[in-house]
Amino acid sequence: MVATPAYAVIEPRHDRDYFTISDLSSEFAVTARALRFYEDEGLIAPERRGTQRVYSHRDRARLAWILRGKRVGFSLGEIREMIDLYDLGDGRRVQRQVAIDRCQARIALLASQKRDIDAAIAELTEFVDVLETGRAQDHRG
């Protein structure tokens, strides 16, 4: 059984109003450097309190989207487009539909790649069998 990453299903955190860089680094198993990179890319926007970054529930949710998207092969541009649709104010309908469409396209691509990989494995396995048969005959002769 494959373990589900912590960010696959993000539960609301009603026990706190904000998160520190350490909180999110620990929860999502990412480095502080990665969080700063996502901030530089405009994907998350923590508030500054002096020198400390303070992350909102929105930042936390966006981080979950980012990590989920990266894990399945979406580019940061694609991820940005999907998470930015949250702000349309339509109850996330467009965001959900775009995400569904993108995910279905990604599933089709991965399924195609899997078929190609399975075919390559079968071809290589058959080739190894042929080579091993030849090697066995070399040792007899």
Image: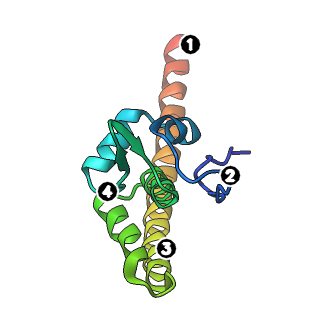
Closest to the camera, between mark 3 and mark 4, is: 4
Left or right: residue 74 compared with residue 24: left
Q: What residue type is labelled 1?
A: Arg
The residue pinned by badge 3 equals 104
Chain-order first, disc 3 or disc 4: 4
Left or right: residue 17 compared with residue 39: right
Chain-order first, disc 3 or disc 2: 2
- Disc 3 to disc 4, C-alpha distance: 18 Å
> Looking at the rendered structure, which numbered label has been put on residue 15?
2
- On-image quarter of the N terminus: top right
Q: Where is residue 34 in the image (x, y as percent from the top left)?
A: 37, 39
Dividing the picture into quadrants, the one containing residue 23 is top right
Front residue of 1/130: it is: 1
Chain-order first, disc 1 or disc 2: 2
> Looking at the rendered structure, which numbered label has been put on residue 140?
1
Circles 1 and 4: CB atoms closer than 8 Å: no
Front residue of 104/98: it is: 98
Closest to the camera, between mark 1 and mark 4, is: 4
- Disc 3 to disc 2, C-alpha distance: 35 Å
Label 2 SS: loop
Label 3 SS: helix
The residue pinned by badge 4 equals 76
Left or right: residue 1 compared with residue 93: right
Front residue of 78/121: it is: 78
- Disc 2 to disc 4, C-alpha distance: 30 Å
Label 4 SS: helix
Report crowding for label 3: few under 14, some 14 to 19, many 20 or more residues within 10 A (C-alpha): few
Report crowding for label 4: few under 14, some 14 to 19, many 20 or more residues within 10 A (C-alpha): some
